[in-house]
Structure formats: structure tokens, C-alpha cells
Image (cartoon, rainbow, N blue to C red):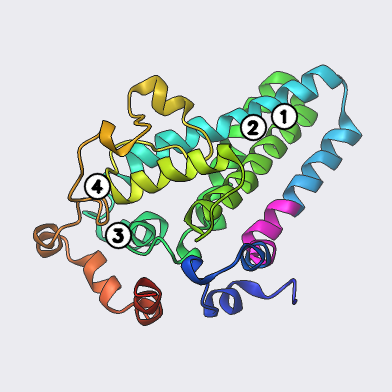
Amino acid sequence: MRLFIGYKAWKEEEYLLNRMTFDDLVKAYVTYPAIQVYAVILLAALAVGGVTIQSIPLFLLSFGIGALIFPIAWYITHRFILHGSWMYRTPWLAGLWKRVHYDHHRYPNDLSVLFGGLHTTLPPILLIAGPVGWLIGGLPCAAAAVAGTVLMTMYTEFLHAGEHLAFEPKSKFWRDIKRRHLAHHFHNENGNYGIAEFFWDRTFGTFYPETTDAPRSPTARNLGYTDEMAEKFPWVKELTEADPRNAMRNRGATS
């Protein structure tokens, strides 16, 4: 297995989760360039924090807060940005919205549009976790907070991919989060915004444990980007029609 293959080479492979085994997923995960960059940042942040550490309790507190930043940041981003309509209504944001969420709902088996890209994940990690940690205890705590957020990002990315993999997890925890996340994709997208936990869904009233607890939504797969919307705001439709991965995705959809 080649460990370092680059974005272009990685994306040229057919990573269809409904055709992959768990071992295939592990290989795809560890060779994805963004995951490798996260690992480097995690180790570097821990090293910087360890060298400059002044207070172990504050360091651990910052790490824990960094880890807890991810779920609330994801909930806010997922609910109010990725499930909003303002990005596809804006020409210069339509392509970003297509890549980071529309394609994932249209093609939930395609791993290449499930993992986040560094251009969308690193800025909020560094600009939110870093300053929070700095306020707690300067450089070592800033590094610890970044490390905590990065570790939670890596953890969530793997669980998220497993939720779409065609396998039955042995863990009750993973089975439960998989069922709830797939309901978000195929039953009603206006709830269950969490990935690995649903604390904030419960807090803000968007959690539904079973499909019988929420009505079926006609826009779960297109996020409201209907034919009518495509007529008014054609940029996502144009990019979708020109997407070279569509043939591969459609083969995966029929298997």
C-alpha cells in the first residue's frame, strides 16, 4: 500500500463505500492527504505544547475544550451554513457548496466527497481553537486546543465514513449513530445534524431517534436545490452536469 499518494491520485480511485470493505475504508482513510496533514498537525501541536508547557491541568483543560469545540462548531456549520440556500444562490460560493455538502447528499456512497478538504477545515480549527487555548494559557494551551480539535476531527471523519459503509457495526454506539445519521440523509435532513454525537441536536430540538419521530422530507437528497431552484440559480447544476465522477457514482448507486 502506498501511503503518500497526493490528492489527485487519491481522487482518481473509485472509493464507493457500498462496494468497500472495512479494510478498504481503513486504507482509504490513512492514505487521504488531509488525514495525513491532520496527523502531522496533531503531533506538532502536542510537541509544541509539551516543550512550552507551564501547567499540566491547563494544558489538559485546553485539550478537552478543543475537543469539545468540534461538535458545536460542526452543528452550527452543518445546520445553518451547509443546509442553508444562500451558498448555492451565490455564483462564487456555489461550487464550494456543491463540493462540501450537496454532492455528499446526492452521492452518499462516494468517499471522495465525504472527507473534508483542508481549505474548509483548517481555517476554523486554527482560528477558533487556537485563540481559545491562547486565552486559557498562552502558546502551550493554544497548541493543546488545536490538538484536541484536530483529534476530534480525525475521529469524526472515520466514524462518518463508517456510517456510510455497507457493514453492520458490532458496537451499539456505532449502530445507533449510523442509523440516526442515515436518517438525516434519506428520511429528513432537517434534524440529526450531529455525526458522532447528538448532544447539540437534543439541546436545540433537532434530534429524532427514529424515522417515525419525524415526517419524511422530499428534499433530503437535494437539500432544497430543486429543478425550480436550478432554473433560478444554475451554477450547481452546470457544475454537476460537467462533473467527470458522475459515471462512477451512478455505477455505485446501482450496485
Q: Which residues are magenta?
A: 29-39
Pointers 2 and 4 in contact (C-beta within 8 Å): no
Q: Is residue 221 magenta?
A: no
Classify 25 as above or below 172. below
Callout 2 environment at 10 Å: few (<14), some (14 to 19), or many (20+)?
many
User: What's the CA distance linking mark 1 and mark 2?
Assistant: 6 Å
The extreme right residue here reads 51
> How many C-alpha atoms fall within 10 Å of the one at disc 3: few (<14), some, or many (≥20)?
many
Amino acid carrying mark 3 in the image: Ala
Under mark 2, the amino acid is: Ala
Most prominent secondary structure in the magenta stretch?
A: helix
The quadrant where residue 90 appears = bottom left
Q: Horizontal and vertical percent for residue 210?
A: 34, 35
Q: Earlier in the sequence, mark 2 or mark 4?
A: 2
Q: Is residue 234 left or right of residue 105?
A: left
Q: Is disc 4 placed on a helix, strand or loop?
A: loop
**Residue under circle 3?**
94
For disc 1, the marked residue is 63
Residue density around tag 4, few if under 14, some if 14–19, many if 20 or more, within 10 Å: few
Which labelled disc corresponds to residue 67? 2
Question: Eyeballing the image, is 230 above or below 52?
Answer: below
- Residue, disc 4: 86
